[in-house]
Image (spheres, grey):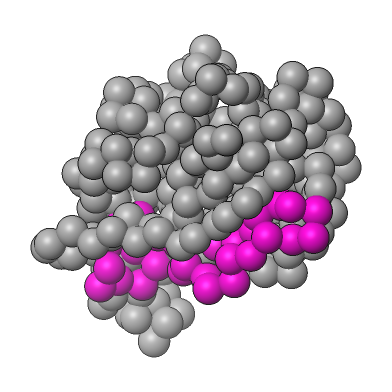
Amino acid sequence: MKWLTVVCIGDVFGEPGRRALTGTLPRLRAELDADLVVANVENAAAGFGVTPTLARGFLDGGVDVMTSGNHIWDRKEIIEYIVKENLLLRPANYPTGAPGVGSVVVKAGGHQVGVLNLQGRVFLPSIDCPFVRADEEVARPRAATPIIVVDMHAEATSEKQAMAWYLDGRVSAVVGTHSHVQTADERILPGRTAYITDLGLTGPVDSVIGVEKDLAIQRFLTGMPNRFEPAKGRAAVQGVVIRIDPETGGAVGIERLRRDLPG
């Protein structure tokens, strides 16, 4: 049996992240025999938000589904786009009435795959409970497919881990985003759900979570606000590769992914 291969890409940050992703994705898809690529793009526009032009570029460049988080509304022009384009997800636990959708079912490798986007509430804006909403949102794609991938966009490690255990056996994978630092805790839980706390950063390597080092250090030293800008120089793509049994939806493998580009 051929496993379904899903590549999840960590937060794409500014021009360096866009350059890293578009520069590696065609080759990466071929190398990994990827059936589906999911990328978090909420920081793609200079580190804050995403524009319709950039979103269309990601789809044209080989990304199948885009996820997001607390920065999804930073660029107001995205509101009209997200209403029409369900391949750009916003967290499903935004209150009723928020534009766009939080989950989608797409075709990949001859199978149907559900992708769900959730956002945590610890140290982030207080929106609806992601655990309660997860129950509602998981039920919808499960009517069509056992293969479901969840982007849990959250600050707290504990909240991401709790969501993975909460959904273990009900989804194929729970991958964390938002922290911009790739973690080394990838594993498959007892119910065959693949998990990692954070996919990492697709963007500048010599940075503070994507931001120009000196600007970040200055804010820590002075406590004064300043304008953050994406760092320049070397960039990398980070994420995971997940292999899934398409018949059961259970994960059979997960491995960290990193590809560096020259500066």
Say which residue appears at 47% left-offset and 33% top-offset: 36
Q: Position of residue 242 (x, y in %)?
A: 54, 49
The reply to whether the magenta stretch includes residue 104 is: no
Q: Please provide the residue range marked out in magenta.
A: 181-210
Classify 184 as above or below 228.
below
Residue placed most toward the observer, 219 or 152: 152
Q: Position of residue 206 (x, y in %)?
A: 25, 73
Q: Position of residue 19 (x, y in %)?
A: 21, 46
- Looking at the image, the residue that sits furthest to the front is 1
Residue 69, quarter of picture: top right
The reply, left or right, for residue 134 in relation to residue 47 is: right
Residue 194, quarter of picture: bottom right
Q: Quadrant of the N terminus?
A: top right
In the rendered image, is residue 67 in sight? Answer: no
Residue placed most toward the observer, 42 or 107: 107
The reply, left or right, for residue 102 in relation to residue 177 is: right
The reply, left or right, for residue 197 in relation to residue 26 is: right
In the rendered image, is residue 31 in sight? Answer: yes
Q: Quadrant of the C terminus?
A: bottom left
- Looking at the image, the residue that sits furthest to the left is 263
Say which residue appears at 28% left-offset and 59% top-offset: 259
Say which residue appears at 36% left-offset and 72% top-offset: 208
Q: Position of residue 203 (x, y in %)?
A: 30, 57
The reply, left or right, for residue 57 in relation to residue 81 is: left
The reply to whether the magenta stretch includes residue 188 is: yes
Say which residue appears at 62% left-offset and 22% top-offset: 112
- Looking at the image, the residue that sits furthest to the bottom is 221
How many badges with numbers are in the image? 0
Classify 179 as above or below 77.
below
Predominant SS along the magenta part: loop
